């Protein structure tokens, strides 16, 4: 077994549990079902009803250009002493950044200050969640660094485009109990830029789970990439996925005709345009553009939509 499993008592228990259930299942020779909770260096750790089992994936997945992801529901068997992933069930959702499957909701964690909130980056995370039909909740961290008027102004902007906002302070535990309630019966991903406080929030949500965290670089205003892998963590009868933070997100894989459906505030206008299939771009008599002019849709948000649409269209040319 890999030496990293023996770093402490918790990991030693993990090792013993893995070996025991590997042996028991090997004797039975049957198929077991489980969920991938961690993947490191080509090894996948599957949580089953009987325990956590280390596995490798069948080569057939490479030929299908399909790679197991954290969050996948799988079937496994055994060859000798080795666990093998035989089947990956259909995914209900799939995020690329962060790389995780079958997520039901996302805590999109942003610092309200230090660094200042980047609305374009926030919008990219929200678009990615919408594209994958994942319910997004915006969590504003470090709320003690701004006054009441400042945080309410930001909250109102985000509420206006259709998203709930929670105020949190990961270090002091503010808002944590509310988050725990929302985690129940969900697979929740924490996403957001590096330095926003995701790892600190994980440590607060689950006592005894310690993930390396880094100070925010004063020079560039964002944190170092200190979270080294994606992992499902048991919290409050649900799972949390902690993943590396990013300062940019690619959205060019989204079809241009689908992008408008990633903006909830467009929903009531999408079918009211003069032309069927209107992209709300340069078409005349566009209901969305009219709503922007009349103040029903935020102008800056619409401008972000246009920049993203043009990014997708330009990328498709090459």
Image (spheres, rainbow, N blue to C red):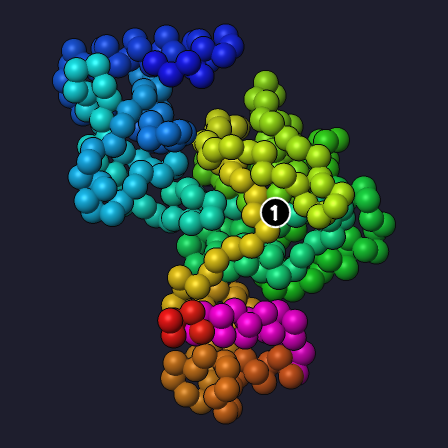
Looking at the image, residue 111 lies above or below residue 233: below
Q: Which residue is mark 1?
A: 193
| Picture residue at 46% right of the left edge, 61% below the top | 251
Of 281 and 291, nearer the camera is 281
| Picture residue at 82% right of the left edge, 44% below the top | 145
Q: Is residue 279 left or right of residue 300?
A: left
Where is residue 183 shown, x and y percent of the image? 53, 36
The answer to if 312 sits in the magenta stretch is yes
Secondary structure, magenta segment, majority class: helix
Where is residue 31 shown, x and y percent of the image? 18, 25
> From the image, which quarter does the N terminus lie in?
top left
> From the image, which quarter does the C terminus lie in?
bottom left
Q: Is residue 167 left or right of residue 149?
A: left
Of 315 and 154, nearer the camera is 315
Where is residue 302 shown, x and y percent of the image? 59, 73
Where is residue 89 shown, x and y percent of the image? 26, 40
Q: Is residue 33 visible?
A: no
Q: Residues within 10 Å of mark 1 (few under 14, many from 20)?
A: many
The quarter of the displayed image where residue 84 is located: top left
| Picture residue at 49% right of the left edge, 70% below the top | 311
Q: Report the magenta residues as a range.
A: 294-313
Q: Residue furthest left?
A: 29
The answer to if 292 sits in the magenta stretch is no
Looking at the image, residue 220 lies above or below residue 225: below
Q: Is residue 51 visible?
A: yes
Report how many numbered discs are placed on residues in the image: 1
Of 274 and 23, nearer the camera is 23
Element type at mark 1: loop
| Picture residue at 71% right of the left edge, 39% below the top | 216
Of 65 and 254, nearer the camera is 65
């Amino acid at each position: 077994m890999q030496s990293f499993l023996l770093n402490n008592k918790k990991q030693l228990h993990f090792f013993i549990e893995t070996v025991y259930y590997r042996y028991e299942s090997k004797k039975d020779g049957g198929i077991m079902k489980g969920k991938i909770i961690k993947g490191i260096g080509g090894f996948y750790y599957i949580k089953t009803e009987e325990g956590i089992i280390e596995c490798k994936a069948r080569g057939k997945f490479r030929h299908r250009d399909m790679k197991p992801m954290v969050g996948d529901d799988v079937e496994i068997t055994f060859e000798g002493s080795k666990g093998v992933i035989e089947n990956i069930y259909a995914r209900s959702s799939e995020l690329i950044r962060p790389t995780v499957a079958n997520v039901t909701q996302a805590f999109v964690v942003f610092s309200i200050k230090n660094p200042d909130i980047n609305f374009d980056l926030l919008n990219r995370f929200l678009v990615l969640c919408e594209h994958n039909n994942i319910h997004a909740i915006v969590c504003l961290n470090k709320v003690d660094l701004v006054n009441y008027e400042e945080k309410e102004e930001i909250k109102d902007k985000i509420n206006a485009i259709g998203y709930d906002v929670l105020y949190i302070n990961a270090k002091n535990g503010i808002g944590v109990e509310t988050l725990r309630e929302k985690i129940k019966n969900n697979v929740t991903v924490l996403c957001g830029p590096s330095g926003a406080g995701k790892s600190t929030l994980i440590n607060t949500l689950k006592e005894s789970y310690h993930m390396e965290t880094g100070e925010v670089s004063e020079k560039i205003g964002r944190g170092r990439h200190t979270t080294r892998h994606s992992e499902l963590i048991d919290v409050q009868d649900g799972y949390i996925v902690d993943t590396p933070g990013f300062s940019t997100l690619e959205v060019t894989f989204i079809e241009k005709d689908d992008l408008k459906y990633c903006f909830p505030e467009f929903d009531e206008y999408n079918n009211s345009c003069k032309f069927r299939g209107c992209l709300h771009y340069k078409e005349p008599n566009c209901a969305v553009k009219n709503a922007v002019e009349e103040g029903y849709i935020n102008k800056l948000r619409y401008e972000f939509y246009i920049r993203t649409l043009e990014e997708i269209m330009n990328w498709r040319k090459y």
